[in-house]
């Protein structure tokens, strides 16, 4: 049997909507304060898409940038995976809509539903096709238009979420580089802790379901917080152990951006200095599946990653789900 190819991220791209919603704007909308939001979450502002924009529109902009950086045309894509909880519509998949927009005619296309862990589930899935030689280029996009399912009368949730898109192009890299380990997990017993209760087959959309706000995000914040701290640590430890890397050798940690206090717990646990952690939640809030790829793209743009660095991506979210990967960084495509 042929050995598996090494797979890495060849290029990234991101797109953020222009409109900024600050904590001070939210003070005028619900009973909250900039002080509460900053001290409890670390968030100062977030981006909100226009009413005309759907997730595929944001995904398209991020995907174009990733393809341009890699100098790959959309026609060369073998597969498109979109991770999102805010698809353009329940079906067809947002990946199919993106495939058409990009003109990626030969690409297969599917959406991944793993909430905030969606990007990690997406790259773990896509990389298998590159590793076994079936595909060469897989585009993975984490995109959310959470403002469309956020209740701006509920202070428990509306201060947290934002919109955005991040894309990563996966392809073969030199042996020993790229993804060294993945850790994925799920605990469906916590499915009701973070969900959008209405609009599916359990509670189909109706005037009544909308009247009861069941089409909005519902979250048990405290429970999710405790879970998040626990699995961020255990998933990070798992990929360190699987790849034989010590925590002192971590060059960059790119965590899901839900709450600065959750990130701080990981920083303490692994003894990291803040310059080894990518943080953007102060500017963008929690963008679910888009948080990690946008933070990764920004870190790259800022020159914070070089060939051979050990990068950990780690996330958690609705499902409940969690995931992490350790990547020995290289954007050099293996021919
Ligand atoms: O990405 C998916 C994963 N999601 C997460 O990881 C989110 C995890 N959870 C969290 O980040 C935090 O639990 C929250 C930021 C959501 C909430 O912070 P908390 O420190 O757990 O606050 P709390 O829910 O215990 O609320 C404390 C108080 C409550 O008032 P009482 O009952 O103590 O009088 C809330 O009603 O703060 C109140 N509160 C607010 N006050 C001002 C809740 N939201 C707000 C608000 N502004 N926006």
Image (spheres, helix red, strand yellow):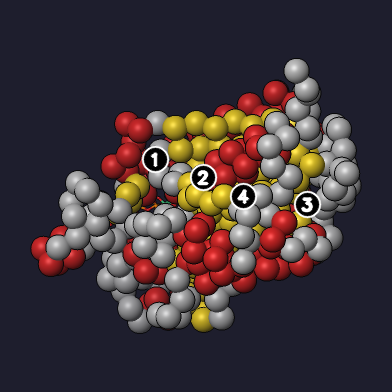
Q: Residue furthest front?
A: 106
In this picture, residue 32 sits left or right of residue 184: left
Residue 214 picture location, percent across and down? 22, 58
Q: Residues within 10 Å of mark 1 (few under 14, many from 20)?
A: many
Which one is nearer the viewer's eye here, 269 or 237? 237
Instruction: Give the residue at mark 1.
Output: 319
Q: Quadrant of the N terminus?
A: top right
Q: Is residue 246 visible?
A: no
Q: Earlier in the sequence, mark 2 or mark 4?
A: 4
Instruction: Give the residue at mark 4.
Output: 79
CA–CA distance in space, label 3 to label 4: 15 Å
**Circle 2: element type:** helix
Instruction: Give the residue at mark 3.
Output: 10
Kindly check if marks 3 and 2 are in contact, taking CB atoms under 8 A apart as contact: no
State which mark lies toward you, 1 or 4. 4
Which one is nearer the viewer's eye here, 304 or 94? 94
CA–CA distance in space, label 1 to label 4: 25 Å
Quarter occupied by residue 225: top left
Instruction: Give the residue at mark 2.
Output: 117
Residue visible at 29% across and 61% down in the picture = 216
CA–CA distance in space, label 3 to label 2: 21 Å
CA–CA distance in space, label 2 to label 4: 20 Å
Residue visible at 83% across and 37% down in the picture = 177
Badge 4 residue CB within 8 Å of ligand 1 = no
Which one is nearer the viewer's eye here, 89 or 219? 89
């Amino acid at each position: 049997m042929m050995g598996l190819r090494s797979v890495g991220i060849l290029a990234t791209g991101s797109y953020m909507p222009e409109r900024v919603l600050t904590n001070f704007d939210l003070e005028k909308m619900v009973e909250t304060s900039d002080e509460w939001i900053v001290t409890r979450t670390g968030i100062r502002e977030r981006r909100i898409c226009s009413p005309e924009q759907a997730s595929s529109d944001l995904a398209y902009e991020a995907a174009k940038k990733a393809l341009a950086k890699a100098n790959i045309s959309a026609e060369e894509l073998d597969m498109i995976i979109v991770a999102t909880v805010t698809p353009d519509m329940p079906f067809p998949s947002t990946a199919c809509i993106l495939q058409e927009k990009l003109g990626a005619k030969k690409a297969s296309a599917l959406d991944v539903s793993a909430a905030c862990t969606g990007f990690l589930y997406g790259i773990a899935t896509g990389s298998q096709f590159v590793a076994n030689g079936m595909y060469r280029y897989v585009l993975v996009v984490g995109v959310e238009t959470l403002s469309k399912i956020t209740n701006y009368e509920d202070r428990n949730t509306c201060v947290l979420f934002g919109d955005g898109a991040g894309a990563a192009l996966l392809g073969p890299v030199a042996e020993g580089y790229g993804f060294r380990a993945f850790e994925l997990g799920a605990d469906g017993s916590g499915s009701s802790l973070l969900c959008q209760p209405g609009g599916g087959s359990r509670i189909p959309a109706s005037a009544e379901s909308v009247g009861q706000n069941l089409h909005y995000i519902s979250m048990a914040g405290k429970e999710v917080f405790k879970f998040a701290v626990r699995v961020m640590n255990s998933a990070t430890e798992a990929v360190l152990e699987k790849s034989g890397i010590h925590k002192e050798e971590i060059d960059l940690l790119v965590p899901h951006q839900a709450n600065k206090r959750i990130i701080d717990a990981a920083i303490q646990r692994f003894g990291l200095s803040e310059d080894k952690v990518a943080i953007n939640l102060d500017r963008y809030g929690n963008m679910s599946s888009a948080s990690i790829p946008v933070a990764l793209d920004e870190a790259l743009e800022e020159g914070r990653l070089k060939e051979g660095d050990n990068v950990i991506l780690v996330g958690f979210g609705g499902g409940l789900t969690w995931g992490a990967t350790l990547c020995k960084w290289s954007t050099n495509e293996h021919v």
